Amino acid sequence: MTNLIKSEMKKIFHKKSFYIVTIIFVLYAILTNVIYKSIDDFSINDPEVTIEELEKENSRLDLNVKENLDKYVTNLSNIEIKKMEDTYKNGEYLINKYVFPLVYQANLLEYMEKDLEESNIVRTKIDEYLNKIKDNDWKYFASMRMSELKNISNEDKDEKTDIYIKLTEYRIKNNIPYDEDNYLNNALIDVENNLSEYYNLKNKKTSKEEQERLDYLKEEMLVNKYILEHQKDIKNNESLKGVLSNFASEFGLFILIYVIMLSGSIVSEEYNKGTIKNLLTKPFKRRTILTSKLLTVLILMPIIILIMVLIEIIVGGLILGFDSLNIPILIYNSSTSLLEVYNVFKYLILSLISNIPIYLVLGIICFMLSTITASTSAAITITFLFYLMSNVISNLALVYNLKIFKYFVALHWDFSYLLESTPNPYHFTPSFSLIIIGIYLIVILALTYIFFDKKDVKNI
Amino acid sequence: MSILKVENLSKKIGKKEILRDVNFEVNAGDILAFIGPNGAGKTTTIKCILGLQKLTSGKITINGYDIKKDFVKAILKVGSIVEAPEAYMYLSGYDNLLLDKNYYKNIKEEEIMRVVKLVGLENRIYDKVSKYSLGMRQRLGIARSLLNNPNLLILDEPTNGLDPEGIKDLRELMIKLAHDGIGIVISSHNLSELENFCNKVCIISQGRVLSLKSIDDLKKIDQAKYLVRVDDVKKIKKYLTKEDKIVNDTLIEVIKDEQEIASFIKELAVTDALIYEVKREDLTLEEAFINIAGGKKID
């Protein structure tokens, strides 16, 4: 048997097609990693109104109408802010948070109240802030925020203010400027922005939608807390870690191509080339020969996946750098409201294992078709069509809650929900799914063996 | 010693009867010419022997093992080429042999070069099979079939694609192997190539064995060709049958066994024709075959 398997391996590793697909995979991996590197460039910004548009709108407004005056002031303030943002590139957050209210106030005073004096006082304050932003003196704003919070807390002590204080203390202690390229800053700001919504939702009876939102906020809170506590750039997916955590979805098709290519040709090609006659006149039972071919596919499957992972680590490491590999992957478990922390490789292995049943079932189906039809192209085509159809059927079954597909294998073969700590979309238990998959595999293999054992090698 | 025994072999595919009651035996040292027109059932018989097709009924034993019950033991000492010498085109000839070697226990790698030398493929054995000519692939196929030191060799049309030199080499190799005690079955439609070195002939047509004889018997006994010279063929014309051939005005050619020729002469003797000469000639294998197969020419 070992010799048989060795021979099968030798045949496969001498085939050109195997190497061609591998070369294509390397190219595909390079492209995928390049895309990950430039996710930022690809992200679509919300179309913003330009300064010109605002100015145009303002010139058309009849300022004698009161509502129009309001609009005019808002537009004017926006124009000013936009100009400031353009001047002070990395001060966007501070400008919006601290300068914008003042600008609005100043314009209000100038155009609505016609109180130029007051307005100018405000303007001095604006200039002071802008100078601080220009000098990159973020600590000025941090300590300002701090004294603000202290005042609030002296009057009325509550949990939320405590957290704000802690966040600001953290910023000062760890020297974190208001810089949107700094992931710690982003985590601090995220928490600040979400905190009041979170407390609102937490302390009331929630509708289903609100509950979903609350779950999301909880997850965000926990992730940001983890980022701040461990100082790890968890959310950055423009990294090797990002690619590896999505390995199954990015490269799953290639795994499928390899598996189907192998299992679809390993029997039928012997028939096509006539070499089956050499093989079947060797001193082995037919089922031994079939088993050796089956085992070859089963052994090669994890080896190929491993090779793909290695290729991706090398390619991705060269393009995106290797340093992200020590950053863990966080999975939020909504039933326990806890974060699960995974090492990148552990997560990768678990996610691949959770997908193995897909490749296994499709591989065995292809193997059966390859044996029964003795046609490589038929085996590969039918298996691919089956895969596409089963995706459609799974979606239909999910959307319309169809019970007739309860025993359809494609509803069972994806176990990634276990890793993501989400409930099974069809409400099946893992053991039920495993039993269904087991039955499919046994039936398919039994058919294959019976057929192969009885099959006459036809005359040409 | 009987190496291969085919008993009452029948094969049906659907309702169509491909083989019916095929019987023959191959002993050590035999070279059996397995002959028949296309579609007669030669390849099917060979495939049944090799376990590539299932028997509908009957029994095949190789070296005492029933191929239905003891396939692995039965096939162990068999070498074969069926239909065409297939090989993995993307591997070298040597790698193909290496693959085959690994299917057997106790065959050393040196054996590979031994069989390569036997078929005279030493110079090209490390080339990819895709670069081989049909004749070279035929040689490689013969090398493969000899790799496991078989005592039964089954070659289906092995002369296809071989040049005259190759056929001569093959003939010498077969004679040598038979001399060493191997039983050989060679199917072919090229009778003249086999005539010179086979010692048994099995003629098959429409799934039935028409004749199974040693080559000498086939040529000698029963029927022979008789040339009869008379003064005028017209005088004896009414005694001739369709199969008899009129060569010219004074000469006819008939194929009859000894009994038939005796009564034929008796009949002629009472006519007014003058019989000058009756000459007996042995049939060539081709003529014997055509006669047995009911006058059908082999294609």
Image: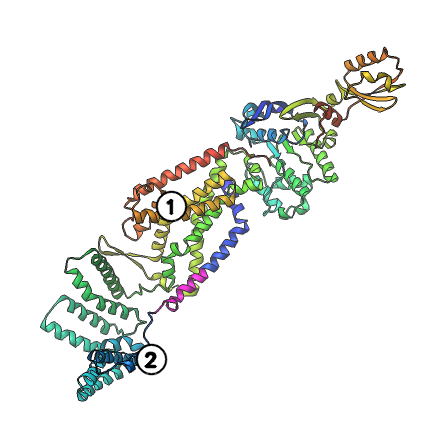
Write down the chain letter for disc 1. A
Q: Residue at x 20, y 66 (%)?
A: A195
Residue ID for mark 1: A357
Which marked residue is nearer to the observer: mark 2 or mark 1?
A: 2
User: Residue A52, which numbered label?
Assistant: 2
> Could you say which quadrant of the image residue A237 lies in?
bottom left
Q: Estimate how packed mark 1 is, as few (under 14), some (14 to 19) or many (20 or more) residues with alpha carbons within 10 Å.
A: many
Range of the magenta residues? A29-45
Position of A286 with respect to B277 (left or right) is left
Q: Residue at x 17, y 63 (%)?
A: A199
- The one of B29 and B259 positioned closer to us in this rendering: B259
The amino acid type found where label 2 is placed reads Glu
Tell me if B73 is positioned left or right of A111 in this view: right
A429 with respect to B180 (left or right): left
Residue B195's quadrant in the figure? top right
Residue B268 % position (x, y)? 84, 13
Q: Which of the pair B90/A96 is nearer the observer? A: A96
* Mark positioned earlier in the residue sequence (2 or 1): 2
State the residue at coordinates (77%, 26%): B284
